[in-house]
Image (cartoon, rainbow, N blue to C red):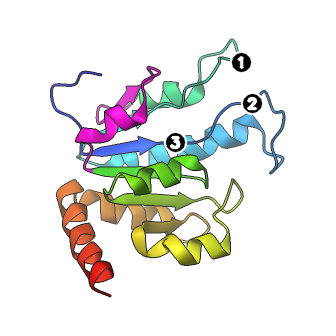
């Protein structure tokens, strides 16, 4: 992937269209896409910082243009990356990783030893209580069910990737010395 300046924020979404089949949560593809669009509109598009949106590799199931890709095209600060490249290779230059939904992507992000912002959608693959208890101290955790979720997330992101890195380094030192 080539960008003149690598964005400090990488968003790694974990939703995948399924043709409305096999969803444990009984969600439709439209519902999942609307969650992503909500995040794009209310949070990511409001940032002065660039953010790379690492599109989840998937087989196209619909003839229509993907509504998430369509929304991304509206914003100059959100860069769509939709190539099927391994996140391990791509994330080397990222300063802050953002992801959502409890999946293997979350554990991958944590293992990168970079700040991880986790968005916990309570109705879409939420983190289990025991897992949350054990890993919350390693995350910038946002519960999407909370009243001011978007506002609080945006307030952190506006401070920039360098600020978030500095907080992460301080917290990491505290946890290592505990």
Q: Give the secondary structure at mark 2.
A: loop
Quadrant of res 113: bottom left
| Within-10-Å neighbours for mark 3: few <14, some 14–19, many 20+ | some
The picture places residue 106, in percent across and down from the top left corner, at: 51, 53
In the image, residue 100 sits, relative to residue 18, either above or below, namely: below
Q: Quick one: 139 or 40, which is closer to the camera?
A: 139
Q: Which residue is mark 3?
A: 13
Disc on the earlier residue, 1 or 2: 2
Q: Check the picture and name the quadrant holding the N terminus.
A: top left
Residue sitting at x 65%, y 18%: 59
Question: Residue farthest to the front?
Answer: 177
| Spatial separation of the CA atoms under disc 1 and disc 3 | 18 Å
Find the magenta span and give its range: 75-95
Residue sitting at x 48%, y 73%: 136
| Spatial separation of the CA atoms under disc 3 and disc 2 | 15 Å
Quadrant of res 131: bottom right
For the question of whether residue 43 can be seen, the reply is no
Residue 61 marker: 1
The picture places residue 87, in percent across and down from the top left corner, at: 41, 35
Q: Give the secondary structure at mark 3.
A: loop
Residue 18 marker: 2
Q: How many numbered circles does the render carry? A: 3
Question: Residue farthest to the top?
Answer: 63
Tell me, yes or no, whether the highlighted magenta stretch contains residue 76. Answer: yes
Q: Check the picture and name the quadrant holding the C terminus.
A: bottom left
In the image, residue 148 sits, relative to residue 22, either above or below, namely: below
Check contact, mark 1 vs mark 2: CB within 8 A.
Answer: yes
Q: Give the secondary structure at mark 1.
A: loop
Disc on the earlier residue, 1 or 3: 3
Q: Quick one: 124 or 89, which is closer to the camera?
A: 89
């Amino acid at each position: 992937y080539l960008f003149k300046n690598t964005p400090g924020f990488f968003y790694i979404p974990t939703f995948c269209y399924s043709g409305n089949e096999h969803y444990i949560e009984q969600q439709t593809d439209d519902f999942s896409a609307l969650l992503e669009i909500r995040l794009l509109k209310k949070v990511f598009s409001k940032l002065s910082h660039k953010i790379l949106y690492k599109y989840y590799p998937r087989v196209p199931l619909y003839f229509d243009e993907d509504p998430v890709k369509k929304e991304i095209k509206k914003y100059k600060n959100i860069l769509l990356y939709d190539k099927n490249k391994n996140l391990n290779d791509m994330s080397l230059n990222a300063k802050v990783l953002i992801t959502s939904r409890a999946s293997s992507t979350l554990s991958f992000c944590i293992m990168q030893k970079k700040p991880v912002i986790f968005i916990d959608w309570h109705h879409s693959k939420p983190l289990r209580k025991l897992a949350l208890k054990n890993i919350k101290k390693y995350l910038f955790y946002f519960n999407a069910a909370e009243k001011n979720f978007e506002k609080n997330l945006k307030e952190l992101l506006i401070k920039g990737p360098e600020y978030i890195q500095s907080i992460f380094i301080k917290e990491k030192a505290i946890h290592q010395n505990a």
